[in-house]
Amino acid sequence: MTETLDPEDNKIITLARSVRARNGSPEGAAVRDETGRTYAAAGVALPSLTLSAIQVAAAMAVSSGAKSLEAAALVTDADDPAAADLAVVKDLGNGTLFLAAPDGSLKGRYI
């Protein structure tokens, strides 16, 4: 999908790609809150806690005082975001979720 994105949307895709590469994770995510602050994360897989990268990034934003998300980016090999990831973005104000491939190319927009 060839599409020109806003520089701020490109930024969160770049942050998501970076955290994915740095941690060697299957997915990376970044979110932007209503004030423009960004949070980037990889998923968590512990015996007692499993969270997707979007869930971790959203939790970081909320725990820092965010009331809503303007946008979220998920970098993954998957063809679609998980229903739980879409639900988290909807819970925080129906911002746009950008799904991107590991090379940063946009696969789709959701919500």
Image (cartoon, grey):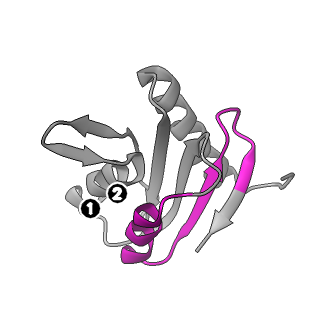
The residue positioned 69% from the left and 38% from the top of the image is 104
Quarter of the image holding residue 101?
Answer: top right
- The location of residue 98, given as percent across then percent down, is 62, 57
Labelled pair 2, 1 in contact (Cβ < 8 Å): yes
Residue 101 on the magenta segment: yes
Q: Which residue is mark 2?
A: 58
Q: Which residue is mark 1?
A: 62
Three-letter amino acid code of the residue under disc 1: Val
Identify the secondary structure beneath mark 1: helix
* Numbered range of the magenta stretch: 81-107
The residue positioned 40% from the left and 64% from the top of the image is 84
Three-letter amino acid code of the residue under disc 2: Ala
Q: Is residue 83 left or right of residue 103?
A: left
Give the label on residue 95, or none. Answer: none
Disc 2: CA contacts within 10 A as few (<14), some (14-19) or many (>=20): many
- The location of residue 74, given as percent across then percent down, is 54, 49
